[in-house]
Every structure is written in C-alpha cells, then in structure tokens.
Amino acid sequence: MSNLAKSLESECQIVSGCDALKRVISPKSRDLGGFSVKRILPSKDVKSVGPWVFFDHMGPATFEAGDGINVRPHPHIGLATVTYLFEGEIQHKDSLGTDATVLPGDINLMVAGHGIVHSERQTPQMMQQAHNVHGLQLWLALPKAFEECEPSFHHYDKDILPVVDLPGGQAKVLIGNAFGCSSPVKTFSETLYVEVAINEGESIQLPHVEELALYVVSGALKVGSFSLGDHHMAAFNEEKGITVTAQSTTRFALIGGGALGPRFIEWNFVATEKSLIDNAKERWQRQEFPTVPGDDEEYIPLP
C-alpha cells in the first residue's frame, strides 16, 4: 500500500517479566472505504525486523459486486514487495509487463531495484460478485549491493512452498529456512517468513535468527507469562529456544533475518541514502518512471 505517513502511529511498549520479549507493537487501523488495513511496521521504536521494513495486515474485508481493492500505479525503489493472501484475489500489473493474479497461499515477490511501477486491483471476475480479501503485505529492504539492481518479478505457486507438520499444527516456510525446510523463494540477505497454524494448548519452539518477530493474525499466544492477542506483534531479543503456546486455535506469521542497518523510508521509497529517495521523487514528479502496460491512464501523485 502506498502511504507511510501514519506508519509511526503504531503503539509500542516495553515488556517486563519476559526476557525473550523486547517490544510488543499494537496496530493502527485505517479504514480505506470499508477496507481495513492494520499497519504494524514501521513503528515508533521498531523500524525494522531483519530486512523487513513494512508490515500491513489487509482485511479481512468483504466487498460487494462492483467494489474492491483499486490501487492505482505507483513507484518503488530499493525494496522488494511480498504479497501473501489468506483469502481473495489481487491482480498485479507492473512496468515490466507482468500481469499476475495473486491467489491464496502463493508468494508474489516484486523486486523494485532502481525503480518499478505497479498497480494492485481486483480481477474483473472478482468484481462481478461479492468477495472477501484477507492477507499480509510486506516490504523487505534490499542490501546496499542490490538496492539499485534491475527490477524483476517472481511468482511462486503455493504447491512448491514447503509445509512442515508440527505438534497440533503446521508451518508453511514462505521465505528462508525453518523447521528443517528451505523455501525456493529468492532472497538477497538472510530472510525469514513463515506462516504457522497451531491448535489450542500446543507449543512450538521458534527458529533462531539474528532478529525475529511474531505477528498474531488470529487467536492468542503465550510467551513466558505474557499473553499476546490477535493483531499484535512481538519483537524478540536475540535468544535461542523461544517457545510459544497457543491459548486458542491460532494463526501467526514469523518474520526476521539478519539486520541490514538503518534505512530512509519516504512514501513508497526505501534507500540507504536520502539522495536516492530525493532523486526518485523528482523522477516520479517528472513522470520519468516506466508506465504499466494496460494500466497507464491513472497514477498516484507524489504526496
């Protein structure tokens, strides 16, 4: 999604009584005409987790026929977007000529590099009927060596993403290595992204990476003596052997990886140097970015 102006409104609290927990982040919700977006990252005190610099929980939302997600073409630099749906469909078009439909369980990885433009809309078929949309949209910062690389797009069907059976549940390894499995999704630095579903009363030990956070999509988890409710993110200290227990049937996402260092973030742009963002802003104002084939009549102006 496009605007980061309110990103730092997320509430962030220090947790006492649990050594594994560093911060708990509460979301700030925005109503986009009946479509609820919960923004978690960046927050006031947690700007990133590993390479992840942006975390939105989209929906769940129900649209009537003729209505739906309608994000006009907009630019990105210095990042890769990762879209993952639990329900619904989104049509992705970009300036590379990509025209792909994001389906539940698939991974769409769009690498912006030195500059890409894309739109996100409902498919014409979905617009003809009432439909639901629910998912997560994340950005990961590209390492300095790759932040001005050539843009690219990568789609991974849900059937090729490894699923691991856990006590009372399952883990789907979306990006990186966890629970003895490796995802085929392209990475640029140490990156972790896992979807987990476990039943009430079951416990699992979390994988260990330099920086790790957990977001409860639905349900509730116990970390030590601390209870983490749905739509909250727990950022952990760098410890091994962190165990969580489901207090109800729970779905959560794990994100993390190796720290990349601070980034400048403005609007849809991420960079190691402010000058790269200033340049991108000027390019967008002058309409020097490439256009999206088949979706070039509209665009989102620079705010």
Image: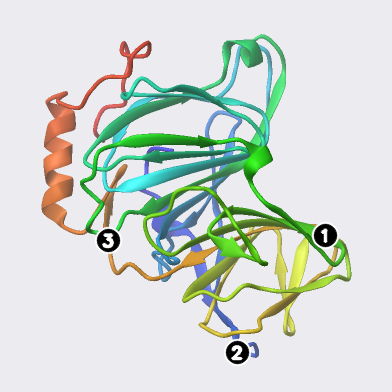
Rendered view: 212 above or below 52: below
Res 19 label: 2
Image point (42%, 43%), residue name: 81
Which part of the image, by quadrant, shows the N terminus?
top left
> Residue 73: horizontal and vertical position, in percent?
35, 24
> Residue 226: horizontal and vertical position, in percent?
71, 80
- Taking the image as drawn, is residue 59 in sight? no
Q: In which quarter of the image is residue 69?
A: top right
Circle 3 is placed at which residue position?
Answer: 263
Q: Label 3, label 2: how many angstroms apart (C-alpha)?
A: 27 Å
Q: How packed is label 1: few (under 14 Cα within 10 Å), some, or many (20 or more)?
A: some
Q: Quadrant of residue 87?
A: top right
Q: Label 1, label 3: how many angstroms apart (C-alpha)?
A: 36 Å
Which part of the image, by quadrant, shows the C terminus?
top left
- Taking the image as drawn, is residue 104 in sight? yes
Residue 287 falls left or right of residue 123? left
**Label 3 residue SS:** loop
Q: How packed is label 3: few (under 14 Cα within 10 Å), some, or many (20 or more)?
A: many
Amino acid under disc 2: Asp
Image point (64%, 42%), residue name: 160
Circle 1 is placed at which residue position?
Answer: 169
Residue 72 falls left or right of residue 226? left
> Residue 70: horizontal and vertical position, in percent?
49, 22
- Whichever of callouts 1 and 3 sits on the residue coming sooner in the sequence is 1
Amino acid under disc 3: Arg
**Label 1 residue SS:** strand
Q: Which of pointers 1 and 3 indicates the residue nearer the eye?
A: 1
Image point (64%, 11%), residue name: 125
Q: Quadrant of residue 287?
A: top left
Amino acid under disc 1: Gly
- Whichever of callouts 3 and 2 sits on the residue coming sooner in the sequence is 2
Q: How packed is label 2: few (under 14 Cα within 10 Å), some, or many (20 or more)?
A: few
